[in-house]
């Protein structure tokens, strides 16, 4: 007897399910792309640490790559120290609940699963979120449980039940080492389904859509491709509050363009962080939360113009 899905779940199945026709990706492409990236790094290789260790290697995340390719001032010192809030911790809590729900032998009510996820995260001293969660008073915690329970329930209603036969991987790390391990590009995939070459990489989002989400997923696809030699078949962002899926097939063209973006951003990031290059300021939406927005003339001018246009 075949599984019966509701319309929202069937939409996900239709968008992410296997396709009879898929882009042809040459087996030699992974080695070719890696060689091109390594070649692009040669002019800045002298800036990298001589010894490749975990502590001093040059690390770049998907967000840092995006920042290096946007406003270089923001990339260098505009982000400020990270702080956990009710808004940005919801994704971590819901992701934990989803991760556990896939492997539970007996289903738990959404609120109980969220409560347990918060308790586990609060007691994990190795995670920075624990320090934030243990400071919540009873009202704030109850409010957070309610918001996360609503998001998790939305996920269970709109995303098809994840079967073990789909080979789910939750919160799995990806990494690419370059320049004799002196550079590491890393990230963490929220959800991956299937095995190469049928793998689908999915980011679960609690916020609104951004074009940068496509760039993030393409980077994950490239890292996975260079590690395994088989590219993911598809990548997708799943927005928990709206139950929308934005997906993209991975082709040779996508992998090549992503590799060019990575090598351009990576070379520039090394120049800025280790070579003391003069940053190029590119005012945009990030000026609203940049730690330097009180001292940056370009940012202040952009914000003033934006406020005038918006009628503030």
Image (spheres, rainbow, N blue to C red):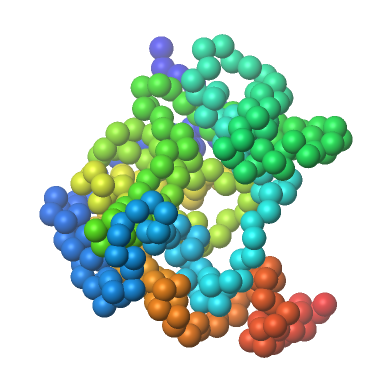
Q: Which of 24 and 120 is in front in this view?
A: 120
Q: Where is residue 88 in the image (x, y as percent from the top left)?
A: 66, 49
Q: Which of 21 and 266 is in front in this view?
A: 266
Q: In this view, does 102 lie above or below 201?
A: above
Q: In this view, does 203 lie above or below 66?
A: above
Name the residue at 36% across, 22% down.
165
Name the residue at 50% across, 60% down.
63
Q: Nearer the viewer, residue 309 or 20?
A: 309
Residue 45 visible in the snapshot: yes
Quarter-of-image position of residue 80: bottom right
Q: In this view, does 15 lie above or below 152?
A: below
Position of the C terminus, as image quadrant, is: bottom right
Q: Position of residue 290 (x, y in %)?
A: 66, 71
Q: Position of residue 183 (x, y in %)?
A: 34, 60
- Most extreme residue toward the front is 51
Name the residue at 45% across, 57% down.
61
Name the residue at 68% across, 53% down.
83
Apparent side of residue 191 relative to residue 125 in the rendered image (left or right): left
């Amino acid at each position: 007897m075949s599984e019966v899905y509701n319309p929202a779940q069937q939409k996900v199945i239709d968008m992410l399910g296997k396709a009879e026709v898929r882009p042809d990706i040459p087996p030699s492409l992974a080695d070719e792309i890696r060689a091109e990236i390594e070649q692009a790094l040669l002019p800045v290789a002298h800036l990298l640490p001589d010894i490749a260790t975990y502590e001093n290697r040059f690390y770049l995340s998907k967000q840092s790559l995006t920042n290096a390719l946007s406003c270089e001032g923001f990339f260098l010192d505009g982000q400020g120290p990270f702080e956990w809030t009710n808004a940005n911790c919801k994704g971590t809590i819901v992701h934990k609940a989803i991760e556990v729900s896939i492997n539970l032998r007996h289903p738990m009510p959404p609120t109980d699963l969220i409560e347990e996820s918060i308790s586990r995260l609060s007691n994990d001293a190795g995670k920075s979120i624990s320090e934030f969660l243990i400071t919540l008073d009873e009202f704030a915690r109850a409010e957070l449980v309610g918001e996360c329970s609503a998001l998790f329930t939305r996920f269970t209603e709109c995303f098809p039940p994840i079967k073990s036969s789909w080979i789910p991987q939750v919160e799995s790390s990806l990494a690419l080492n370059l320049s004799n391990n002196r550079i590491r590009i890393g990230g963490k995939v929220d959800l991956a389904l299937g095995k190469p070459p049928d793998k689908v990489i999915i980011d679960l989002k609690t916020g609104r859509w951004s074009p940068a989400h496509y760039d993030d997923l393409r980077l994950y696809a490239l890292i996975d491709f260079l590690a395994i030699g088989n590219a993911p078949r598809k990548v997708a962002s799943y927005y928990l509050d709206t139950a929308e899926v934005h997906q993209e097939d991975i082709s040779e063209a996508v992998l090549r363009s992503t590799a060019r973006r990575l090598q351009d951003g990576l070379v520039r990031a090394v120049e800025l962080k280790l070579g003391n290059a003069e940053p190029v300021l590119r005012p945009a939406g990030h000026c609203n939360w940049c730690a330097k927005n009180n001292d940056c003339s370009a940012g202040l001018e952009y914000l003033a113009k934006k406020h005038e246009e918006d009628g503030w």
